[in-house]
Every structure is written in C-alpha cells, then in structure tokens.
Image: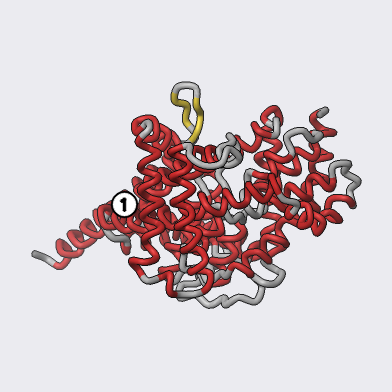
Amino acid sequence: MSQHSKTSAEQSGSSRTDWKLVLKLVVPSVLGLFIFFAPITIGETRTIPLDHMVTGLRNLLGGAASWVALAMIVAGAVYPFVTGQWKGTLTERVFTVLKLLGVVAALMAISGWGPAMLQAPDMLPFLFDTLVISVGLIVPVGAVFLALLISFGLLQLVGVLFQPLMNPIWKTPGRSAIDAVASFVGSYSIGLLITNRVYSSGQYSAKEAAIIATGFSTVSATFMIIVARTLDLMHIWNWYFWLTLLITFLVTAITVRLPPLRGMNNQSERPDDSVPRGKRLSAAWQAGLQGAAESPGLVESVRLNVKEGLIMAISILPSIMSVGLIGLVVANHTPVFDWLGLVFWPFVAVWGLPEAMDLSRAAAAGLAEMFLPALLMTEADLAARFAAGVVSVSSVLFFSASIPCILATRIPLSVPRIVAVWFIRVALSLFIAVPVAYGVVALTGG
C-alpha cells in the first residue's frame, strides 16, 4: 500500500472515530437532558419524564411502596453498623441513633400505631407519604439515568461554556452549572449525588463542593409546586418560580464571600482550564468529546451511579423520618421556633411587614423541615406568603432531608458549619424576599 493510501486510510479511520465520539457525547447527553429537564404532559400532569417514571413506579407498586420505603429505612439504620461508621465522629453516632428512631417512626406511620398527635395528617403521614416514599424512589431511579448526564462529556462541555459566569459570581467551576439546574428541575438529592460524584473524582475542591451543596442543591420544581399550592401562589407561579431561583442564587453569591465558606480549602485536582478569547464554543465542544472518550461503558456508569444512589437513599430516609418528626413536634407544640424567630425578626421588620414575627418564626422552623414555613403561613397576606415560599426554598438546608443528605456525602461539612450557612441564607433570603414580595403584589394586583 502506498504512503498516500495509508494516510487516506488513517484519516478515514480518524474520521470514523470522531463520529463515534460525537455520537457517544450527543446521544446520551440529549437523552439525559430530556429525562431530567424537558417537561412533558402525560394525562393531566405536566412534569419532567423522571418524575413521570417515579409516579408511574409508585402507582405500579401501590401499597407495596410503603414496604419498599420501610425496607430502605431499615437498611439505612443497619448500614452504619455494617460499615462501622457509627464508631466515627459524634455527629455520626448521633445520626446513627436518629436512624434507629427513624425505623420506629416508619413503623408507626405504616401501622397507624402511636399517639394521636403524631398521627395527625401533617405529622407522620405527611413525612412518610409525601417525603420518604418519594425520595426513596426518585434517588435510585434518577441514579439510573444520571450516568447519561455526567459520564459522557456533557459535564465537561457545560463546564467550559459556563465558566465565565460561574467562577466570578459563585466561585465555582463552570461544570457546577449543571448541578444547579439538576437541583431546581430534578431534586436536591440528585444535585448532591452529582456533586458528591464530581467531588470524589477530584473535579471540585472542598470549598467548591461545599458552595454547591449549600447553595444550589435545593428542592425541586415539583416540590415548589406543592409549596405554591399550599400558600395559594399558583396564580402567580411564574413570578414565584423565577424570582425564587434568582433570589436563591443571589443569596449564594453573597454567602460564598462570607465565613464559613470563604475560608475552606480551594484546591482541586482538575480545576477549570483557561480558554482564549473567541474560543469558548470550540473549547467546550472539544472538552465534551474528550470527556466522552474517557468515559466508561454505559453499563459500568449505570452500575456505579445506582450503587451510590442506593447508598445515599438509605442514608437519608431514616433521618427524614426521625428528624422531620422531631421538627414538626417542636414547631407545633413548643415555643422553640418562636425564640429562634426573634433572631430573624429584624431582617423582616425593617420592611414594615405586619406579619414580621409570624414570618420569622416560620422561617426558623424551616431548619427542621423546608415545608414547615408554608404550613405555618397559609393564613397570612399575599406578601408574607410569597416571602415564606421563597425562603422555604432559598434557605436550602433543613434537618429532615438535605442536611443528612449532605452528611452522607464525602463533602467536608460539619453540622455547626452547615447551621452557620443556614442562618446566613435565611437572614439574607428574608431581607431580599420581603421587598420583592411587595413588588410582586403591586405588579399583579394581589
């Protein structure tokens, strides 16, 4: 064969390889984006395909969904003893005990046994039916499709594309943009799963992972609909959703510049590469192709993500039951959140809101469970209800689910540090949300 023929053959082979890489990048990525981010209507419900899948699975399981959730809760309570984690830090020992209490709470929820106070519709039934079963299904099911988003080059492509925006404003790599979107459209558990996966691979520093976990990994758009319905905000849904997203990210931009996040370790194994001017799109495409070339096979990617998803699910479900129930009891039957609300009162009262104390108390209760502010503010005026809906989402951190979920990852965040970030987020969210709520009332006519 002549040298010219060899060269032509090599170029042809290279071309075929390039097209294979293009398909390897594009097909899984488009499918993943569709499953996580493209709302479709099935029946009378319009939501993302992943949510439809989880709803369909729950309907298929019927009453067995409760027993599946219970099995996962029991597995989560046993897991620290199997791995020896319960011997670790004081926090791990405390949450091991709480997970055991979560088993008891789950048994009470299924059997209907226990004090009437705990069996009220907004207590154990709410925690188990609305939160535990949903999270228990969405995390493992979502993990199956998570590989499509993070294992075939899309993360690298998005990272380069959004680097100019993410770095200056939120002090995180461009690739964290997909975490933010996944959290708002999918769920905080999916967002944290992505964050933990990327941090474990050395692509985030400890500081970057902490910023993403405490600033972007909030509840999903689907859960925001529940908040909006509870607070009678659906007639201004678009105002509520987009302004909540904006306020959440604005609060994050401020929080990253304050202790305790500001001083965390910011060294990572794979920081964002600098890109010459005018080369952003081509560099993003090449980064995506390189990510596709380095990715494992589909089966291996799915296996790894499902394993991590199941471990995360069983780690957080027992804590949702125990911590969530404790929070509801404290909110409904003690003055603890009244006292804690006094800390936030100045951030609301400065705007002259009549329900300043009620809103402050409700915001404080959100530390236990993000839905509590909505439950406590259903009878307030529109401005106060709007602000409560915003704060319940923008505070991001709560003990019934997101905090245990963060603690189940490898991200180096302690409980005191998380609570400090929560306080800053709530104070800033209240200070910003109240005047914004006044503006929405004025623009929409109430």
Going by the numbered disc 1, the residue's amino acid type is Lys
Residue underneath mark 1:
24
Please identify the residue farthest to the left as the structure is shown: 1
Residue 32 visible at all? no
Query: In front here: 317 or 20?
Result: 317
- State left or right for residue 327 relative to residue 27: right
Please identify the residue farthest to the top as the structure is shown: 43
Q: Position of residue 387 (x, y in %)?
A: 76, 43
Find numbered disc 1 in the image and state the secondary structure of the residue it sits on. helix
Q: Position of residue 411 (x, y in %)?
A: 50, 68
Query: In front here: 63 or 29?
Result: 63
Say which residue appears at 46% left-offset and 50% top-offset. 104
Say which residue appears at 57% left-offset and 70% top-offset. 414
Q: Position of residue 208 (x, y in %)?
A: 56, 68
Query: In front here: 226 or 133?
Result: 133
Quadrant the C terminus occupies: top right
Q: Is residue 275 above or below residue 232?
A: below
